[in-house]
């Protein structure tokens, strides 16, 4: 199954009911309906071509770690990208960056993210540049919102950290299980959410005001909560992708893509929290 995250969707990662593995097809067992892995790949996506008649190498019993992605790599790269976002946001906040420049930074960040998403290999320079421009946008926007709702930015940061920690714990304890049904549900919900927000934006642009009201008042609160929940579900999908990439023996440079995908999701959650806090506090 391909990832919902455009960063991972072009890669060789897949999802299954449990832990990923090389050609992880299991043998059926009596009384165990989940013994057969319905999502196992037929070949190791990272294996090197072999002799005629054997397009992919059989997975080794203990794949070598040299040059392979590890959890430490993912943590280090994610710390770097998220750290850059925070530093750039702090700069924009301290310098009181204008919203006009912030919108420009957001557009640059979007273009960089799209370029990286459609590349077949990670380009660290693109990812780091995205983090800087995204951070500038978030910092200026947070400063603007905080001027009207004191403490909104800090509440959004705390909320984002809480969601990340909660999803990580739920995923590691297997309370959240990423299956094909889970994936399809999240994708369907996300598509519906994005389409509704696009329609609301069109009404706001051409009709003025708040459009259909999906981002203000009671509906704004409801859709803010839905946006945060969707972000949390995407985090679970990202965790599964990282886990599968490590199990498949993905190349070390894939850790940059993992960090990029996680950063995109964390930015989504933070933006939804910031919007929700602004609505809730603004009504008081």
Image (spheres, rainbow, N blue to C red):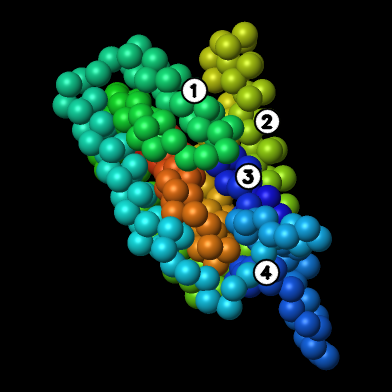
Q: Which is more foreground, mark 3 or mark 4?
A: 4
Whether residue 237 is visible, yes or no, is yes
Q: Are marks 1 and 4 in contact (CB under 8 Å)?
A: no
3 or 4: tag closer to the N-terminus: 3
Q: Which residue is mark 4?
A: 58
Q: Counting residues from the N terminus, which is met first, the one under dot 3 or under dot 1?
A: 3
Tag 3 residue: 9
Q: Which residue is mark 2?
A: 195
Q: Secondary structure at mark 3?
A: loop
Viewer-closest of 70 and 183: 70
Distance between the alpha carbons at the discs numbered 1 and 4: 39 Å
**What SS does tag 1 mark?**
helix
> Of label 2 and label 3, which has the lower sequence position?
3
Corner quadrant of residue 174: bottom right
Q: Is residue 273 visible?
A: no
Tell me how far mark 2 sits from mark 4, CA to CA.
43 Å
> CB of mark 2 within 8 Å of CB of mark 1?
no
Q: Determine the residue positioned at 58% across, 32% down.
A: 118
What residue did someone put label 1 on?
Answer: 111
Sooner in the amino-acid sequence: mark 2 or mark 1:
1
Q: At which x and y percent is residue 178?
A: 63, 63
Residue at image coords 36%, 49%: 78
Which of 271/224 is in front?
271
Return the x and y of residue 89 as percentages of the image width and height.
27, 32
């Amino acid at each position: 199954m391909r990832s919902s995250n455009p960063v991972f969707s072009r890669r060789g990662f897949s999802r299954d009911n449990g832990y990923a593995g090389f050609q992880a097809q299991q043998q059926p067992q009596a009384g165990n309906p989940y013994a057969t892995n319905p999502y196992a790949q037929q070949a190791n996506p990272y294996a090197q071509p072999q002799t005629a008649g054997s397009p992919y190498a059989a997975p080794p019993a203990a794949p070598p770690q040299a040059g392979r992605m590890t959890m430490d790599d993912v943590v280090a790269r994610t710390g770097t990208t998220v750290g850059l976002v925070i530093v750039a946001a702090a700069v924009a906040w301290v310098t009181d960056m204008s919203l006009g420049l912030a919108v420009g930074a957001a557009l640059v960040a979007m273009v960089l993210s799209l370029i990286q998403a459609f590349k077949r290999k990670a380009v660290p320079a693109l990812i780091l540049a995205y983090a800087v421009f995204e951070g500038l946008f978030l910092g200026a926007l947070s400063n603007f919102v905080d001027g009207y709702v004191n403490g909104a930015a800090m509440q959004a940061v705390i909320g984002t950290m809480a969601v990340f920690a909660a999803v990580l714990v739920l995923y590691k304890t297997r309370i959240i299980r990423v299956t094909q049904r889970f994936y399809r549900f999240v994708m369907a919900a996300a598509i519906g959410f994005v389409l509704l927000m696009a329609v609301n934006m069109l009404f706001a642009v051409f009709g003025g005001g708040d459009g259909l009201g999906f981002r203000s008042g009671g509906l704004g609160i409801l859709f803010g909560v839905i946006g945060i929940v969707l972000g949390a579900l995407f985090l679970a999908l990202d965790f599964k992708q990282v886990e599968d990439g490590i199990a498949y023996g993905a190349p070390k440079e894939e850790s940059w893509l993992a960090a990029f995908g996680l950063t995109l999701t964390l930015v989504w959650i933070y933006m939804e929290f910031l919007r929700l806090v602004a609505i809730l506090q603004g009504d008081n």
